[in-house]
């Protein structure tokens, strides 16, 4: 995933972080989604999800997702 682009709308910067998250109101613990982020937008995307109470994990993009 070395060519990943930040998930923030309008951003075309290379992603360096992955944010694995889920919406517990509609998905069980086995269903997770992944957004990727550049250094600049990591705090925005992480805080956006956290403010909604979504469980999330942040890791470097090169690391495999914890399951």
Image (tube, grey):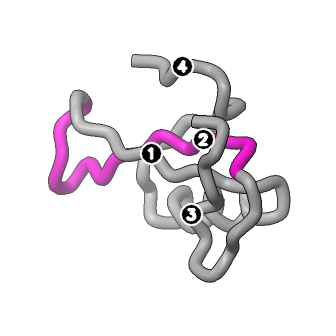
CA–CA distance in space, label 4 to label 3 = 18 Å
User: Foreground residue, 38 or 44?
Assistant: 38
Q: Is residue 43 visible?
A: no
Magenta run includes residue 23 = yes
Indicate left or right for 15 with 24 as reference: right
Sequence-wise first label, 2 or 3: 3
Q: Position of residue 65 (x, y in %)?
A: 49, 23
Measured along the vertical axis of the image, is residue 12 above or below residue 20? below
- The verdict on residue 35 being magenta is no
Question: Do tag 2 and tag 1 residues touch (Cβ < 8 Å)?
Answer: yes
Q: Element under label 3?
A: loop
Instruction: State the separation of the CA atoms marked 3 and 1.
Output: 9 Å
**x, y percentage for residue 44?**
70, 67
Report the residue marked by disc 4: 64
Q: Secondary structure at mark 1?
A: strand
- Whole-angstrom CA distance, mark 2 to mark 1, is 7 Å
Q: Residue at x 51, y 60 (%)?
A: 49
What segment is highlighted magenta in the picture? 15-29
Decide: few, some or many residues near mark 4? Use Cα within 10 Å; few <14, some 14-19, many ≥20. Answer: few
Query: Mark 2 — residue?
Result: 18
Q: Residues within 10 Å of mark 3 (few under 14, many from 20)?
A: many
Query: Looking at the figure, which quarter contains the C terminus?
Result: top left
Most common secondary structure along the magenta stretch: loop
Q: Which residue is mark 3?
A: 7
Q: Position of residue 28 (x, y in %)?
A: 18, 37
């Amino acid at each position: 995933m070395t060519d990943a682009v930040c998930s923030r709308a309008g951003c075309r910067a290379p992603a360096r972080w992955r944010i694995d998250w889920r919406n517990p109101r509609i998905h069980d613990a086995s269903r997770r989604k992944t957004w990727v982020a550049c250094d600049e937008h990591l705090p925005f995307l992480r805080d956006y999800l956290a403010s909604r109470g979504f469980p999330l994990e942040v890791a470097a993009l090169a690391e495999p997702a914890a399951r």
